[in-house]
Amino acid sequence: MQLLTHKFTVEQYHQMGEINLFDPSDRLELIEGEIINMSPIGFRHAFAINYLGNWFPRQLGEKAIVSIQNPIRLNNQSEPQPDLVLLKPREDFYENQLPQAEDILLLIEVADSSLSYDRDIKIPLYAKNAINEVWLINLNQNQLEVFRYPDNNQYQKQQTLTSPQTISSLSFPELNFPLNKIFN
C-alpha cells in the first residue's frame, strides 16, 4: 500500500497560519512541502544562539544583518527557520519579503537533539538552494561542521573543526571566530 501525502506551498503554509490553524506556540517550518515540528531548544542550544547573536553584530557592525531563528524562503516548497543567518545588508531590513538564498552570507544551525535532521535534511536542502556556506554547530560532539561551495545539490568542501581552533567565514575572512567560546 502506498501512503498518500500532500505537499504544501509557501503560500498555503502562510494561509494556514493566517487562519490560526496552528497554535501560536508551535515551532514549525516548511521543508520540501512538509510542515515539520521543530525540536525544543535546550539550554546549550540557547546559549550558543545567544553567544553568536551577540558576537556577530559586535564584530560586523553594519556589514551584515544578523537574523536569529527567522524564516528564509528558499523556493515555493521550503521556508526553514535556521538558527542564525548573516544577511546582505539592506536599508529596509527585508521588511517586504523574506530573505532568499542569494541574500545569505552565512547560515548557522545549532544542533543537539536535531543533529540528524539538520545534517540529513536541512544541509542538503541548503546545498540544493545554493547557499554558499553553512556551519553546523554539533553540540553533541563539541565540533563545528563546515559546508562550503554547493554544486549538484551537495557541498563540495566539508570540514570538521574542534576547540581551540578558529574559523573565518567566506564572506568575512578577516574575522576569526574562536570555537572555544562555544565548546568549553
Image (cartoon, grey):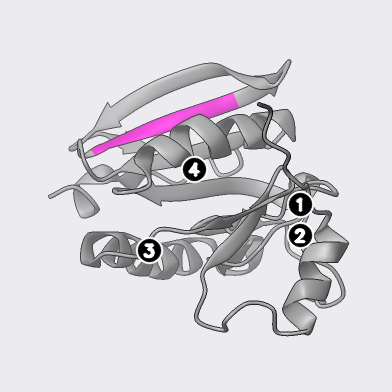
Residue type, label 3: Ile
Graded by Cα atoms within 10 Å as few (under 14), some (14 to 19) or many (20 or more), the crowding at tag 3 reads: many
Mark 1–mark 2 Cα distance, whole angstroms, equals 6 Å
Mark 4–mark 3 Cα distance, whole angstroms, equals 22 Å
At horizontal 55% and vertical 35% (from top left) the residue drawn is: 121
Residue 73 in the image: state x and y as whole percent.
Answer: 76, 55
Secondary structure category for the residue under label 4: loop
Identify which residue, 15 or 155, lies in the foreground: 15
Q: Which residue is mark 2?
A: 99
Instruction: Say which of marks 1 and 4 sits in front.
Output: 1
Image: magenta residue range = 143-148
Q: Which residue is mark 3?
A: 49
The disc at residue 111 is none
The quadrant of the picture occupied by the N terminus is top right
At horizontal 45% and vertical 40% (from top left) the residue drawn is: 117
Secondary structure category for the residue under label 1: helix
Count the labels in the image.
4
Residue type, label 1: Asp
Mark closer to the chain start, 1 or 4: 1
Graded by Cα atoms within 10 Å as few (under 14), some (14 to 19) or many (20 or more), the crowding at tag 2 reads: many
Q: Which residue is mark 4?
A: 174
Q: Which residue is mark 1?
A: 103
Graded by Cα atoms within 10 Å as few (under 14), some (14 to 19) or many (20 or more), the crowding at tag 1 reads: some
Residue 78 in the image: state x and y as whole percent.
Answer: 73, 49
| CB contact under 8 Å: marks 1 and 2 | yes
Identify which residue, 48 or 61, lies in the foreground: 48
